[in-house]
Image: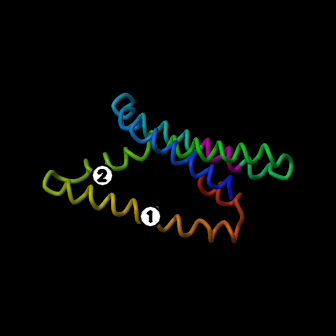
Amino acid sequence: QDHLAALGVAVLAARAVATPAGILLMDVLGRRGCLLAGTLGTSLSMSSAALACALTPLAPAAAKVAAVAGLVSSVTLFELCLSNASFTLASEVFTQQRRQQGVAWSHVCNYAVKAVSMQMFPVALAVGGPLPLWVAFA
């Protein structure tokens, strides 16, 4: 269980640093640059985690390190490039009169999807194992 606590701390630390940095990065790269960098980077990092799970029988220790690195880098890239862009884009879809309501609903939907996925993740992990989940997220 200690390794799960360490993983949780690593993900929390990555998010704590990457979220404020992502706000500044959007000013530098712009929305399109953040979306492209985040999508490409997250796909590559989740693909490396999927590959690590597939290679677990050959080198279990190395596979665990690679899976953790893939997960933490995916979370970091998501927070840097993608998480802030979704709220910015949602605010631009609505007219000035409806903008506050639109952003509020985008937050509600975002957290609802996260809550459902967090509840379904352990079930899917127990049913299919880690490899299908990493492939699906990649």
Say whether residue 118 is left or right of residue 123. Answer: left
Q: Nearer the viewer, residue 66 or 48?
A: 66
Q: Residue furthest front?
A: 2
Q: Residue furthest left?
A: 97
- Mark 1: amino acid: Val
Element class at badge 2:
helix
User: Residue at 20% across / 55% down in the picture?
Assistant: 100
- Mark 2: amino acid: Ala
Which residue in the structure is indicated by mark 1?
A: 113
Q: Eyeballing the image, is 99 above or below 21?
A: below
Q: Eyeballing the image, is 34 above or below 133?
A: above
Categorize mark 1 by other alpha carbons within 10 Å: few (<14), some (14-19), many (20+). Answer: few
Which residue in the structure is indicated by mark 2?
A: 90
Q: Which quarter of the picture shows residue 88?
A: top left
User: Residue at 49% across / 40% down in the picture?
Assistant: 38
Task: Give how far across and how far down residue 29 sits, in percent.
Answer: 39, 30
Q: Earlier in the sequence, mark 2 or mark 1?
A: 2
Q: Eyeballing the image, is 47 above or below 27?
A: below
Q: Nearer the viewer, residue 64 or 109?
A: 64
User: Residue at 22% across / 54% down in the picture?
Assistant: 94
Task: Give how far across and how far down residue 71 sits, in percent.
Answer: 61, 47
Q: Which quarter of the picture shows residue 21?
A: top left
Q: Count the labels in the image.
A: 2
